[in-house]
Amino acid sequence: MMKKLTSKIKATNAPIVVGLDPMMKFIPAHITEKAFAEYGETLKGAGEAIWQYNKGIIDAIYDLVPAVKPQIAMYEQFGIEGLIAYQKTLDYCREKDLVIIGDIKRGDIGSTSSAYATGHLGKVTVGSKTYYGFNEDFATVNPYLGTDGVKPFVDVCKEENKGIFVLVKTSNPSSGEFQDRIIDGRPLYEWVGEKVNEWGADCVDESGYSSIGAVVGATYPEMGKVLRKIMPKSYILVPGYGAQGGKGADLVHFFNEDGLGAIVNSSRGIIAAYQSPAYEKFGSLNYADASRQAVIDMREDIAQALAGK
Amino acid sequence: MMKKLTSKIKATNAPIVVGLDPMMKFIPAHITEKAFAEYGETLKGAGEAIWQYNKGIIDAIYDLVPAVKPQIAMYEQFGIEGLIAYQKTLDYCREKDLVIIGDIKRGDIGSTSSAYATGHLGKVTVGSKTYYGFNEDFATVNPYLGTDGVKPFVDVCKEENKGIFVLVKTSNPSSGEFQDRIIDGRPLYEWVGEKVNEWGADCVDESGYSSIGAVVGATYPEMGKVLRKIMPKSYILVPGYGAQGGKGADLVHFFNEDGLGAIVNSSRGIIAAYQSPAYEKFGSLNYADASRQAVIDMREDIAQALAGK
């Protein structure tokens, strides 16, 4: 899977993942009106609107980027109907050959983490048959429960040629509350980073990268610099660019000398681009074109930052 | 919600929550055969088997216990069909007036945690209407992202009269890897416990308890003793009793002097009781009767331990 991800990043020249985190307030009126006309102002209507909105964006950006990252919470809030929209979105992204990072932030004790890993990355057994559940390519994983909680994901990654990104240093303002606390002279996130490196040591493929990656927020570039060295073989998934305040220049430390090793997420900066002053000229009917332009501009911003490294 | 939970605990004299964590290997053959005859060896067939299995257990135990705790991972591994079984299980438990603790271990940055809180505890807006999603009474929450990640749940708890249990010290063998690391002279789990106490300070109802509780494993009773004092107003959800090794005598430290303050989970020890030597005499056809007896025995085990406190 790392071979596929790195090949696609090289081919597109875009170490970018588009966060498919739909909120009702982002969806253009013509889409919600049509969905509500068909299904009413119901959970099913919301699911249909989300799916149609996503489809428009995917059609507009799939040739420009290697990967998408749907945030499952944004679907789960609509219950089963939301999760059906999540599943449709995944299936369509797979059709378009996009690498899918399920932003699920799961993590539990052993047998329970196994069930999450099975449901999102692996195959579940029913009688004499096996089936994929959600079938993402990567999942994000919370490390608070330690090795027991992460190892079942690593095992499924090996079996299925898939990957995970473990939360190390998150992009939010209060991430330091626990993650930055000093333990034996080093912050907790460094200890988690050491473990990520260890968990992924035997998951390196011909790309030179391990399928056990890490999440480190663009909002903390100096910490990213240190973590880059602690986990040299791990891909870093970098949220926090754009709407959360991270800038192109902040990103250089997350990359290795080979220009690889990081993939930067932008969610609302791309999917709701038409609502921002820079792209409002596209108008809501052409929201997907605005998203396409926002991807092109983000690609340029990152390329310039890396060129100046 | 704490008033409801504590009243039900007093009425049943059972500070017990039954973990509805179905695994295919627990489900008696007569149930899976019937489900597969109807829907084939499919995800839908698995969902039907899980739901029928749960229904039998709920019917057998609902008058004995205050609460159930379905572990969503066990359903999510079957994709949408599994989650439909989860929803059916929740709806049926609500009909039986059981307090529902959704063991979802979610947690993310602000807006995303809001979406999870909305989907599991609150109401989501669709056009001019609002709907409950999964509608549990409590959810378990992962604290790794700090206050930003937990606060949206607290806000929804206040609006909806619901509650959460924040992971403080989990029951699994490797929980100490990060949770026990020493920060300024105290382990991380104590710092998290302090925060739980702080987050829940203004969520105390007439029961005297806060709707912001904590998860502390029965497998770590000495740590439970300390955490009990750090979070005097928080209910402690105690997993790890039974199959994971926690015993009745280990539990006394999790309770307050009023005999309240903790609720002990048992999952496979109850739902798969008929597969253990102590209850195999019931046979698989009477699996639910075995579960009922296991609840009665667990209630006695805890009562004896508390009487000897």
Image (cartoon, coloured by chain):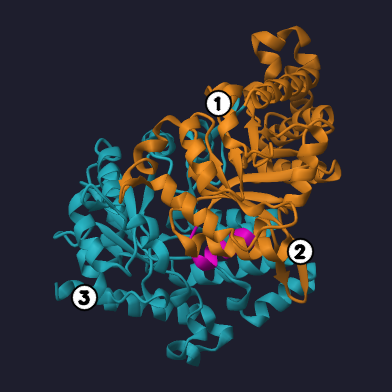
Chain colours: A cyan, B orange
Identity, as a three-letter code, of the amino acid under mark 1: Asp
Mark 1 lies on a secondary structure that is helix
Task: For the C terminus of chain A, give its image quadrant.
Answer: bottom left
Q: How many marks?
A: 3
Residue at position x 46%, y 65% in the image: A19
* Magenta segment: B108-118
- Same chain assignment for discs 2 and 3: no
Q: Residues within 10 Å of mark 1 (few under 14, many from 20)?
A: some
Give the label on residue A79, or none.
none
Q: Which residue is mark 2?
A: B131
Q: Which residue is mark 1?
A: B250
- Of badges 3 and 1, nearer the viewer stands 1
Can you see residue B296?
yes
Q: Residues within 10 Å of mark 3 (few under 14, many from 20)?
A: some
Q: Chain of mark 3?
A: A
Relative to A114, B56 lies left or right: right
Residue at position x 41%, y 65% in the image: A174
- Of badges 2 and 1, nearer the viewer stands 1
